[in-house]
Image: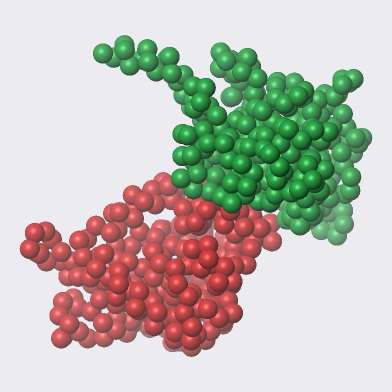
Chain colours: A green, B red
Amino acid sequence: MASYPLTLPAGESSPLGILTHPNPALWILELRNGVDNRLTQPLLVGVLKPALDAVETDWRATRGRSSNNPNEWAPAALIITGKLDQDKFFSNGFEFANIKGDRLWFPHTFDPIALRLMSFPIPTIAAINGHAFAAGFVLSLLCDYRVMTSGKAWCSMNEVLFGAPLPVSFVHILKSKLPSPAVLRACTLEGKRFTAQEAHALGIVDELADGGSAGVLSKAEEVAKRVAGLAKTGVWGIMKKSIYPDVFEKSAGHAQPLYPPEEDALFRSKL
Amino acid sequence: MASASATHHRPVRVCFPAGSNPPLGILSHPSPTLWVIELRNGPDNRLAEQVLLDVIAPALDRIELDWRNTRRKGSDSEEWAPAALILTGDLRQNKFFSNGLLVESIAMRGFFPQIFDPVITRLLTFPIPTIAAINGHAFAGGLVLALACDYRIMTSGRAWCSMNEITFGVSLPPVVSAILQTKLPSPDVLRACALEGKRFTPQEALACEMVDQLAEGGSAGVLHKAIEYAERVENLAAKGVLGTLKKSKYLSVLNILGDDINLPTPHEADTMFRTKL
């Protein structure tokens, strides 16, 4: 069993993330990377990955424990939240420097962790305690449930506004989780900023919570309690791979989409 | 055999399997444009191998052959007769539409790719409109059968729709999963249905558009409403292209037919995780 609270990356004096295990059926991962919680390489590889490893290892060890039934695991859920001592950001997505020009960023760094989270074997809840932009919004969609602050915070995919294409993995994640083609269009083609109230009305988030980050976390814990039992039969993650096949089958091995200057050059070369 | 003329229509009633007594299913043809398959396999109407192969498959054969024999030259194109098929549970009771597959079928190697998937995808892409008259509980394979139809009329009485595999720790076979993904109205409903194993009441199923209409009056009422619906949609068969359109629409389902995709069982997933540590 890991030692909680687990501060990550291991050995760092100022952690980028803290994993706690307040009761046998609940884990909470607080991501805390600077002012706006960017999903940098150290955060993804040094925090998110080892946190998922620790939770999954400890949860799998519960097999057969309570009932002596080897086909039963403990009820459990994982909440992922932004920095809890502020109310402005859940996550502002990637650092542009990380993704610009690094053609390995998606296939090698982000996608494996994203797909792992999306098929995680226990229910996951994103406690969206502030703005969720671009990859930050995608992070919340990778979770099974979303609780968002009722305060001033937006969800958006703003790639269209700064001229970046969507990676293949993002497309399939968005299509799997957004409620309709109309919402997909508003989100990806219009770069619409959904207020928390709009996100809730459209079914993008499941619940709103008052009271800032503390209130969001508290509501997320209510949701966690309600859904933790679904982990017991051990098929939760497998079921997700089954019902979201495009994410798992089509994210890898595809040419990443072109940036506008590349597409421009390609068009001209064909003239 | 061809039901070409309304004045000469001979109502058909065929019991399946051939020669069995009591029948596991009855095919009737009460009017020139209407077919009804009533499944009658025991108190909870399981979709046993025999029901799939010796009732539904041959009944579909009979309907399709008969309907295709109505082909004639119309004013500007070839035409077939209007037609619709209603699929229902045992009309002598109000408790079950179908309680799904038998445990022994699910455990049988190759059952889904060889037996279930071909029958269900045939129904999914049938060349005449299909209406499920959900006259009771529709659980697991029973719900899939209803979803494979174009339309769903459900009793307003005490009955639920659910996929309960999550409670048994069994994953969804690929074609079943693909049907849920394509027929359920939204990611939220898919999550509630497949991941949470939610039991939808008729009112909830209607509100989220999992079913098209509710009907009072038990099985008789559901059948009556389904017949009204059939009369509204039977003309969709007339140009002979409905089946092809369905094949295009449900390409994602047809493309995985025959794939023996093996998702791990919970035990295997556990083992795989440990060996990676």
Above or below: residue A7 compared with residue A226: above
In the shown orientation, is residue A79 left or right of residue A237?
A: right
Give the camera-side residue of A62 and A145.
A145
- Whether residue B259 is visible, yes or no, is no
Give the camera-side residue of B15 and A250.
A250
Rendering coords of residue A62 (x, y %): 84, 49
In the shown orientation, is residue A95 left or right of residue B121?
A: right
The quarter of the displayed image where residue B117 is located: bottom left
Residue at screen point 70% across, 49% down: A208
Rendering coords of residue B46 (x, y %): 54, 73
Rendering coords of residue A104 (x, y %): 59, 18
Q: Residue furthest front?
A: A152
> How many numbered circles does the render carry?
0
Quarter of the rendering occupied by the N terminus of chain B: bottom left
Give the camera-side residue of B166 and B27.
B166
- Whether residue B42 is visible, yes or no, is yes
Residue at screen point 56% across, 13% down: A101
Above or below: residue A237 compared with residue B6: above
Give the camera-side residue of B271 and A97.
A97
Above or below: residue B26 compared with residue B49: below
The quarter of the displayed image where residue B14 is located: bottom left
Quarter of the rendering occupied by the C terminus of chain B: top right
Residue at screen point 88% across, 32% down: A6
Residue at screen point 61% across, 41% down: A195
Rendering coords of residue B246 (x, y %): 34, 55
